[in-house]
Image (tube, helix red, strand yellow):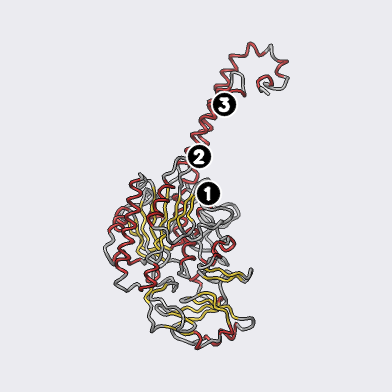
Amino acid sequence: MPGCWLRGGGGPLVLLWALALPLASLRRSDRPKLLLLSFDGFRWDYIDRVPTPHFHDLIEDGVTASRVENVYVTKTFPNHYSLVTGLYAESHGIVANEMYDPATGRSFSMETDSIYEPAWWEQAEPLWVTLQNAGGRSAAAMWPGSDVKIHGLYPSRYLPYNASVTFEDRVARIVRWFSGPEGEAVDFGVLYWEEPDESGHALGPQSPLMDPVIADIDEKLGFLVAALKEAGLYEEVNLVVTSDHGMAQLSPDKIIELDQYLSRDLYTWVDRSPVVALLPKEGKLDEVLGKLADANPNMVVYKKEDVPERFHYRHNGRIMPVLIEAKEGWTVMQNRTGPFMLGNHGYDNSLRSMQPVFVARGPAFRHNYVQDSMRSVDLYPLMCHILSVDPLPNNGSLAAVRDMLSQEPPPPPPSTPGTAPSTPGTPPSGPPSFDVPPGADAHSYAPLVGSFLGVVMVLGFLVVYIKQVTLKQLPSLKHRSREMSQPLLQEDLHL
C-alpha cells in the first residue's frame, strides 16, 4: 500500500497516485472515434442512379467528394491497403491481387492462403498497427489484410475473413467493439462488404439488374446508421464510407487474345486483365516486347521502366518487367476458353468508371460540404489527424482535404534542423516516393500537455504540503540527527 511508504506522510503520494489514474483514463478515453466502411466496387455515380436516401442523408449532414482518384492498379487488394497506409502500390508492396516476388520466388494470390503470410504486407504499416503502437485500440471486420499479423500485431479485435458472415453480423460485432467498457472499447474500426463488386463482375455495371443491388447497399448503410444510433454512438463516431474502385462494362466482342501475338513459351502469366503482368523467360525480355509492340490498338504495352510516372507503379520488385494495359472495356485473355466477366476494374485510375464514392459524417466533419476532388491516399493523413495519431511517411496530403474538417487543422511545426521541408502532396524525387509527414498536430499533443499540467499541479501541491509538514516537525528534528544518518525509514519498510 502507498501509505506504508511514509509514516504519517503517505497522504501526498496517495493523492498523486489517485490523481494520476484519472489522467491516464482521460488519455485513453479522450481519443476520437472513427469507422471506415468500404463497399467493394461501389462506383462514384451509383448513388445517383437509384434512390439512395441513406447516402444522401450522410451527405447533407456531412461531406462528400465529387471526384476521388484511387491508386493504380485499380484492384481490391492494392487499393484497400492504400486506404489504410496512404501509400501508392509501389510503396506499400501490395501491387496487385496476383503477384510474384522475384526476391523470394514466392507467389501471392487472393485465392490462396498466401494472403496470410506477413512478409507480403510488411513493406508498409496499416493504420490499426500504428494506432495500437500509440496506445489506441482497433477493430476489423473482414478488411483485406486485417487478419494478418503485420509487424507482430493483429487488430485489437478482428474477424478472420469469411464471406458467409452477413453484413448485419459484421456490423453487430463492430458496434459491440466500439461500445465496450473503458479500456476495452476500440477507437478505430474498418468494415468491409463484398458488394456491389461481385454483382458488378457478373452482371456488368450497365445492367438494370444492378439497380436493386445498389438499393440494397443503401439499405445496408441505413442498417449501420441505425445500429450506431441504437448504441448511442452515432454522434460520437466519425463515419467514412468509401470504396476501393469502380466498375467498367465489358463485352465478348472486345477480347484481345494474347496467343495470337506471343508464344506461351516466352513468358509466365502473373496477373490478369485489364493490366496483365508478364514475367519473360530468362533472356526473352526484348523478344517479348518486340512481338507485343503495336500488336493490337486496344492495348498498351509498357516496359516496367517506362510506365507513366503518374501511375506511381515502377519502383517495386513485385511489379513485373512487362505490363499490358487494355483500353477501357477491353479484356486481355490468352484465348477465349477462359472465364469471362461482364464487368471489371483495374484500368487507368484517371477513368471515371474506375473511381469510388466518398461520404463522411461525424463530429470531425463539416455539414453539407462538397469537396471538388481528392485522392484516396489523402484519406490516411485525414484519419490520422482525426484519431490524433502521428502519420507515418505517406503519399497523401492533409492539406488537400483539410476543408472537409469542421475545424481547420493547425499548420505543421517547423521542420527538424537539417531536414528540408516538402510540399504537401508532392513526393520527393526518387523511388519509392513519400510525403514527409507533417509533425504531430495539436490533437496529437493534447493528452501529453494535459498530463504534464496535471503533474505540475500535483507536484506544486506536494511542495506546499511537505513544506508545511516539515515546518511543524522542526522542533523535534534537531534531536533526530543521528537517526537521519541511518537507512531512511527502515523502520517503516515492514520487511
Amino acid type at circle 1 is Gln
Q: How many marks?
A: 3
Residue 449: which disc? 2
Amino acid type at circle 2 is Val
Q: Nearer the viewer, residue 141 or 28?
A: 141
Between marks 3 and 1, how big is the CA–CA gap?
31 Å
- The N terminus, quarter of image: top right
- Across and down, in percent, residue 65 comes to 36, 61
Please state if 347 lies on the left or on the right of 20 as rendered: left
Residue at (59%, 86%) from the top-left corner? 287
Which mark is nearer the camera, 3 or 1? Answer: 1
Q: Nearer the viewer, residue 425 or 97?
A: 97
Q: Residues within 10 Å of mark 3 (few under 14, many from 20)?
A: some
Q: In the figure, residue 56 lies in which quadrant?
A: bottom left
The answer to the question of whether label 2 and label 1 lie on touching residues, with beta carbons closer than 8 A, is no
- Across and down, in percent, residue 103 comes to 64, 69
Kindly tell me whether residue 422 is visible in this rendering: no
Q: Nearer the viewer, residue 435 or 146?
A: 146
Q: Earlier in the sequence, mark 2 or mark 1?
A: 1
Q: Nearer the viewer, residue 124 or 233?
A: 233
Q: Say which residue label 3 marks.
A: 13
Residue 413 vertical placement versus 356 (above, below):
above
What element does badge 2 sit on?
Answer: helix
Residue 132: which disc? 1
Q: Residues within 10 Å of mark 1 (few under 14, many from 20)?
A: some
Residue at (35%, 59%) from the top-left corner? 64
What element does badge 1 sit on?
Answer: helix
